[in-house]
Amino acid sequence: MARYRPEPAFSHGTPPRTAVLLANLGTPESPTASALRPYLKQFLWDPRVVEIPRPLWWLILNGIILNTRPKKSAEKYASVWTEAGSPLRAHTEQQARLLADALAGAGRGDVVVDYAMRYGEPSIPAVLDALRARHCTRILVVPMYPQYAASTTASVTDEAARRLLNWRNLPEMRFVRSFCDHPGYIAALADSVRQHWAENGEPERLVMSFHGVPRFTLDKGDPYHCECQKTGRLLVEALGIDPARALLTFQSRFGKAEWLQPYTQPTIEQLARDGVKKVDVICPGFVADCLETIEEIGMECRDAFLANGGTDYALIPCLNERDSWIAALSDVVRSHLAGWPEGAVDSDALAASAERAKALGAAR
């Protein structure tokens, strides 16, 4: 017999709601080894992330990695932690709030907007439960990964689907697969580069660094590599620069297996050794700054570039709360909401939006 989770209090006259759930990778609760251990365990045990036979990987993960890596990772997280906590979580929370404002401004004040993390808190199951309690019967899940990969986008879908397995009253569900070539997303990336160049001058080379994945995933049919290449090509075209000035690389390699190449840090080191003095790096695969952008690219790669003879290195910030990006995200969301009926205006969301607008006006 099927076992269902307790349903929230429900009246058959309750108007249905539509919700948008932004889902990003995740973050530990604090930059400490004790907080990193459960976070890394959840992350690295995901079979979408590490495709090694489970018995062997269990021994490696629990016998070696979780006994050595949490302390090292905690030191890295401590270097990027802010008063608001994890940069990734802070930016994602702000993006959800700004998206709600943008949707309200576009006449979709009926849409409930929330965010969740695939690993860590707030978890996807917990936020789905909260949306169900608010009588959201139509839910659009937006993995915040512009380029599709099984290890990221598909893992979000897996987690959401698992939560629904023992719900009795299922919502309508939609998922954004990717937006690697969305005109608004590409325009927002180009705007961020142009603004940086207007303020700091143009570099000799622009490095577009994407998160890496194992090389075998491409051979098995994962489209991630192709979608990264497409984003890079469209960004270069939008900037109107000579393609020879731009390089596409992959970062965050883990383990001894071959990953997608060329690798970011070795490429940056070689540029310096070849006499290139000024380099800018942008990370188009991340829509919010996080450990991988701030620490790995902004600190480690900068030190490597300078140590090999480079003199001027800059990380162009991720899209974060940039107006053009929020507008693009709103376009992506509204296109995927098409066909769903518009419900009653979410008064709580509108009140919160009004308060934010009031606070912003006072700040100005």
Image (spheres, rainbow, N blue to C red):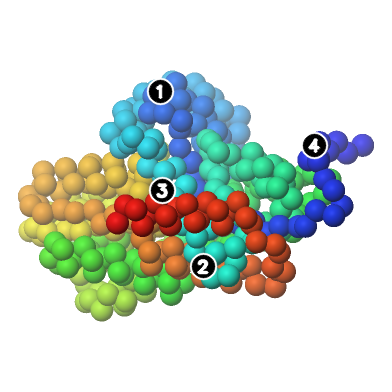
Q: Are there few (<14), some (14-19), or many (20+) residues within 10 Å of tag 3?
A: some
The image position of residue 58, as x and y in percent, is: 56, 28
User: In terms of sequence position, does the residue under pointer 2 or pointer 4 come before the other?
Assistant: 4
Q: Is residue 243 left or right of residue 319?
A: left
Q: Earlier in the sequence, mark 1 or mark 4?
A: 4
Residue to which mark 4 is pinned:
5
What residue do we see at 55% from left, 53% from top? 351
Marks 1/4 in contact by CB < 8 Å: the verdict is no
Q: Is residue 224 visible?
A: no
In space, the residues marked 1 and 4 are separated at their CA atoms by 34 Å
- Is 293 placed above or below 232 here? above
Residue kind at label 2, given as amino acid type: Gly
> Callout 1 environment at 10 Å: few (<14), some (14 to 19), or many (20+)?
many
Q: Position of residue 195 (x, y in %)?
A: 23, 66
| Residue position for label 2 | 105
Q: Say which quadrant the N terminus sits in.
A: top right
Count of numbered circles in the view: 4
Q: If you read the primary sequence from the N terminus, does the residue marked by circle 3 or circle 2 appear first?
A: 3
- Nearer to us: label 1 or label 2: 2
Of 233 and 87, which appears nearest the observer? Answer: 87
Which dot marks residue 91? 3
Question: Between disc 3 and disc 1, whose residue precedes?
Answer: 1
The amino acid marked with disc number 4 is Arg
